[in-house]
């Protein structure tokens, strides 16, 4: 494009050849990233001051050459983010991603498919129905009667579930309704409960046992007491894989309570739901099929790039009867009943075509490959546990559960106080993060500061883990030396 044309490009377009060159350059960057990410450093460290001096600028009124902007982004913006798909990105919930889905997202955006209503894109709606059916089948939900919707993530799926639960169980008056979840439930549930207008007095946070499962006795006691006080226990949220420890609440038992008490059973499987694709995970997740609603999060352990979450429900009518509004400007596109308008199944009207990446990656790799990847992840966590158990330096705080393991440095025969151990482990994390070699941060379990690994990246090897532990041991040694020097 000549610079003259560039002066005021009111059609916001590029000539064909420039588009090609620009696009190929971006593809080269992405492919190069996939090829080299394993040997990069996963951690980006940058302060607000550094980012401000790098990126702060006024509104760009006049055009710049496209390549100049792109180069700036590739040099300065992208490197200043953690690589959550890195094999040594152990913290939070990693995002391993996959190339097919990245390209699928590019298609969805490239064609700017509107995935809100049937009339706008019949095929996008149908693909959402098809992929939703796959998920319904995987989780043992009825495929005809059941339904669901892709959301931006697990948080929105939980919110969508609770809005639905509230309407079905409470109608328009929820002033006496009470809701139950454990102290290990994900914070997005509390956020959702607040968003739907519940007061603090209506939320029951149930303590967990030594294995971080919701205490069933306490749950039953509190529900009974609330009934006696004339309240309306209306929903239990169970975790199928807590984010901290991968713990699964007793799903079958909770399902039984919900049936007897006429309560809604929501399962938050955003982290752990995908484990159903492995033989062991399937056993552990028994009872998941009894939920009224289930959150799963394809951008976690189904290896999709951000953003895609998912809510499944036993009866798709629950969603449409909760979210359907018929304003006059959508009158002409309502269509017939079998033609689903996903804007009637959730909160968003305009929606990107999220189903496409799930569809294309599952078809391309086959469910078989996903099963192998997840089984590999579960095995890897167990092998890590075995290594730690054999070491005189490490102690397991929470054993390998759905590919999450929590442990801490606590050498046999040493006489550190709890406080000192907390500090040593906090410092190990700090040093390894500062080295940028691995993303390994702490969490707090039963009052102890511990290190946590979430091993859902199929490209992480046992070697990666051994090397990281070795580095942690070196940092611990360094630190003990420093402290003893300070003491002397
Ligand atoms: C990650 C997570 C969420 C939130 O999902 P987002 O996709 O981050 O919105 C909810 N529940 C659990 C158990 C999670 O691990």
Image (cartoon, rainbow, N blue to C red):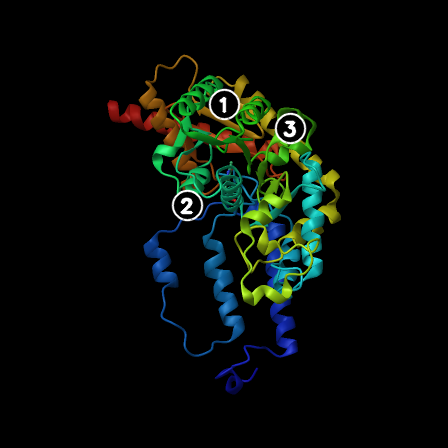
Looking at marks 2 and 3 on the same chain, the residue that comes earlier in the sequence is marked by: 2
Query: Secondary structure beneath disc 3?
Result: helix
Mark 2 and mark 3: Cα distance apart in space: 32 Å
Please name the residue that numbered disc 3 is placed on.
Answer: 281
Residue 177 drawn at (x, y percent): 43, 34
Q: Quadrant of residue 479?
A: top left
Which residue extends farthest top?
413
> Which-is-in-front pick, marks 2 and 3?
2
How crowded is the residue under tag 3: few (<14 C-alpha within 10 Å), some, or many (20+)?
some
Reply above or below: 238 against 46.
Answer: above
In the rendered structure, find residue 271 and report the number of the disc placed on it.
none
Residue under the image location 63 percent in, 38 percent down = 314
In the rendered structure, find residue 213 and report the number of the disc placed on it.
1
Reply above or below: 83 against 201.
Answer: below
Residue 257 drawn at (x, y percent): 54, 23
Residue under the image location 62 percent in, 51 percent down = 34
Reply above or below: 366 against 474.
Answer: below
The answer to whether the residues at label 2 and label 3 have Cβ atoms under 8 Å apart is no
Please name the residue that numbered disc 2 is placed on.
Answer: 195
Mark 1 and mark 2: Cα distance apart in space: 26 Å
- Does ligand 1 reach within 8 Å of label 2's beta carbon? no
Left-right relation of 368 to 186: right
User: Image quadrant for the C terminus?
Assistant: top left
Query: Secondary structure beneath disc 1?
Result: loop
User: Image quadrant for the N terminus?
Assistant: bottom right
Looking at marks 3 and 1 on the same chain, the residue that comes earlier in the sequence is marked by: 1
Left-right relation of 433 to 148: left
How crowded is the residue under tag 2: few (<14 C-alpha within 10 Å), some, or many (20+)?
few
Q: Is residue 230 visible?
A: yes
Query: Secondary structure beneath disc 2?
Result: helix
Q: Quadrant of residue 14?
A: bottom right
């Amino acid at each position: 494009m000549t610079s003259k044309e560039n002066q005021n490009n009111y059609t916001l377009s590029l000539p064909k050849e420039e588009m090609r060159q620009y696009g190929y350059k971006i593809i080269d960057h992405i492919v190069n990233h996939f090829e080299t990410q394993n040997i990069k450093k996963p951690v980006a460290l940058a302060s607000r001051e550094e980012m401000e001096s790098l990126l702060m600028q006024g509104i760009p009124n006049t055009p710049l050459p496209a390549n100049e902007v792109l180069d700036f982004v590739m040099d300065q913006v992208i490197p200043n983010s953690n690589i959550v798909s890195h094999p040594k990105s152990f913290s939070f919930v990693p995002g391993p991603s996959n190339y097919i889905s990245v390209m699928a997202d590019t298609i969805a955006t490239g064609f700017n498919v509107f995935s809100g209503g049937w009339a706008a894109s019949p095929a996008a709606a149908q693909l959402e129905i098809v992929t939703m059916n796959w998920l319904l089948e995987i989780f043992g939900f009825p495929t005809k009667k059941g339904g669901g919707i892709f959301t931006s993530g697990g948080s929105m799926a939980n919110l969508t579930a609770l809005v639905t639960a509230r309407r079905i169980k409470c109608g328009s008056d929820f002033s006496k309704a009470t809701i139950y979840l454990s102290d290990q439930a994900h914070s997005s549930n509390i956020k959702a409960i607040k968003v739907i207008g519940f007061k603090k007095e209506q939320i029951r946070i149930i303590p967990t046992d030594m294995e971080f499962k919701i205490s069933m006795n306490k749950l039953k006691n509190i529900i009974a007491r609330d009934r006696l006080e004339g309240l309306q226990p209306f929903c239990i949220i169970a975790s199928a894989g807590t984010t901290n420890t991968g713990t699964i609440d007793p799903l079958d038992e909770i399902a039984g309570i919900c049936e007897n008490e006429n309560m809604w059973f929501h399962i938050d499987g955003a982290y752990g739901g995908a484990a159903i694709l492995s033989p062991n995970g399937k056993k552990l997740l028994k009872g998941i099929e009894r939920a009224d609603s289930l959150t799963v999060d394809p951008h976690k352990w189904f290896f999709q790039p951000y953003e895609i979450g998912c809510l499944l429900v036993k009866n798709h009518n629950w969603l449409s009867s909760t979210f359907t509004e018929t304003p006059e400007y959508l009158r002409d596109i309502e269509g017939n009943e079998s033609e689903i308008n996903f804007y009637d199944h959730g909160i968003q009207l305009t929606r990107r075509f999220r189903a496409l990446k799930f569809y294309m990656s599952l078809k391309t790799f086959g469910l078989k490959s996903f099963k192998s990847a997840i089984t590999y992840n579960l095995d890897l966590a167990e092998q890590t546990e075995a290594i730690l158990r054999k070491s005189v330096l490490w102690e397991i705080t929470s054993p390998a559960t759905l590919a999450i393991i929590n442990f801490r440095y606590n050498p046999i025969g040493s006489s550190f106080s709890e406080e000192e151990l907390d500090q040593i482990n906090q410092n190990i994390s700090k040093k390894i993060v500062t080295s940028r070699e691995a993303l390994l941060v702490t969490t707090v379990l039963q009052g102890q500061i511990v290190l946590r690994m979430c091993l859902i990246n199929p490209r992480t090897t046992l070697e990666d883990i051994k090397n990281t532990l070795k580095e942690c041991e070196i940092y611990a040694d360094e630190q003990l030396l420093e402290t003893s020097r300070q003491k002397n």
